[in-house]
Image: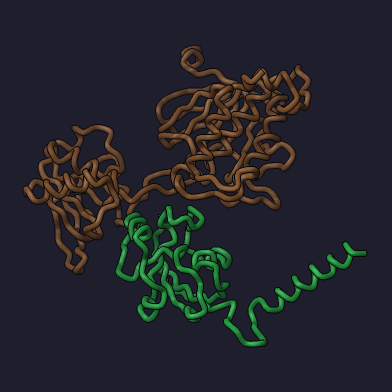
Amino acid sequence: MNQLKEAAIETDVVIVGAGPAGLFSVFELGLLDIKAHVIDILPRAGGQCSELYPEKPIYDIPGLPICTGQELTDNLLKQIEPFRPTFHFNEMVETLVSLGTPEKPEFRLSTDAGKIFHARVVVIAAGGGSFQPKKPPIPKIDAYEGKSVFYAVRRMEDFRDKNVVIVGGGDSALDWTLNLQPVAKSLTLVHRRDQFRAAPHSVSAMQELVAAGKIDFRLGQITAVEGEDGELMRATLKGNDGVEQQIACERLMPFFGLTMKLGPVADWGLQLNENLIPVDTEKFETSHAGIFAVGDINSYPGKLKLILSGFHEAALAAQKAHRYVYPDKKLLFQYTTSSTNLQKKLGVS
Amino acid sequence: MHEKETGVMAKMSFEDAATRYGAEPGGGAPTKVKITFIDSQGQARTVEGEVGSTVMETARRNDIPEIAAECGGACACATCHVYVDENWTEKAGKASQMEEDMLDFAFDVKPNSRLCCQITVRPELEGLVVTTPAQQG
């Protein structure tokens, strides 16, 4: 236990999710002197805004007639800079255990990267859940995942001298085609069409490898796999002409983008309603004292999944969070426009 | 008094709009069309789609299964994939370049595949039939 304590990161609040609701939570909590660590499975801040529509305009942010998902994210990051949040990207919170009491909550969180956090309060701002790789509808593919079917490369050595099949036509598929070709025994790239939504230089490098006979490019899809004990041996390639063929395949990498899955949140013992977390509309607190849920992941009568709702929820949740983090301090309601105290925190006074 | 009048007028025009919505007694273009979604098990559901909205929005409003539409219609997720019935492919139109790119992230893409957030409901689509795949995400 002592060892765990030592290894743990101590913080006032852990915010799960770095989308707009999570980022603005940093701001509202920061104004109340509550320090935040923010954890997100994606490699950057922004959540759906930067993952799904970075270049697409948003028209319903109050006071911003038009801005893109990326601009909103960048502005939020700038806005929360004075509070110096610590970000933990490419990490997913796996477990959330309550250590405290309803009056004095305390939590222990662990991530898939092995980090441990101790926090007084937790704000779940996980949107539609975590972004995870889409798994193609190939029968029994689960049996091979992690052993011979991969959605990301952790160790290049896993692919050395193997017959590798990569499916997809985006940047991930092409980058790994180029990177794994030198180590693989053979490499087959399978895509539904001969056009690629990837960096032009990757596309031409791949085409050169095809022309030189160093990789095989096939139009079609993988419809079945065969193997033993998690180790793949063959895959069925169904060509766009409908003809099926067996190809050697010991490593398969399907790249079909990301999808949102609720993920481990479902196992945290919180009351759920159709994959959403019910909260009250005064404090946006969940069924567990000290755990708040803001943004798209919560539900309450009249809920609208709008970014602006997440902002409002973050502000109200912060008020109650203050009671947990500073039980002996009285909370004074103040405006950033007129309070020199708040302006000091924002670094403008 | 003036305010009250404005209120009444606003209400009347709202009711007027409500009456026109759906039926068009005085002729003119229809404001709703029937769209049939056939799920991967073969069950058909026919619902009304509002002209000007999208086929994806129509599906969501009517709780059609097998349409996830994770991104909410931004053509950014490929989870509203449908197969357009062959009698309708021409009228529904072809996928744009952006949509074709996004279809790379859908499964079992066929020549009649579309992302239905990109199909706008138009009067000439009265009777449209689309089939949904078993797996979107």
**Residue found farthest to the front:** B2
Residue A338 location (% of width, % of height): 75, 25
**Relative horizontal placement of residue A312, taking residue A243 as reference (left or right):** right
Is B27 on the left or on the right of B59, as rendered?
A: right
Hue used for the chain lettered A: brown
Q: Is residue A285 visible?
A: yes
Relative to the observer, which residue lies in front, A5 or A90?
A90
Quarter of image, res B108: bottom left
Say which of A44 and A149 sits in front.
Answer: A44
Give the chain letter for green: B
Q: Is residue B25 left or right of residue A221?
A: right
Q: Quadrant of residue A115?
A: top left
Instruction: Spot the residue most to the right.
Output: B1
Q: Position of residue A13 (x, y in %)?
A: 59, 25
The residue positioned 35% from the left and 78% from the top of the image is B86
How is this picture coloured? by chain
Question: x and y percent of residue B43 in the render?
Answer: 46, 74
> Where, by quadrant of the figure, is residue A284 drawn?
top right
Q: Using residue A180 as the reference point, say whether residue B126 is left or right of it.
A: right
Q: Residue at x 61, y 45 (%)?
A: A61
Q: How many marks?
A: 0
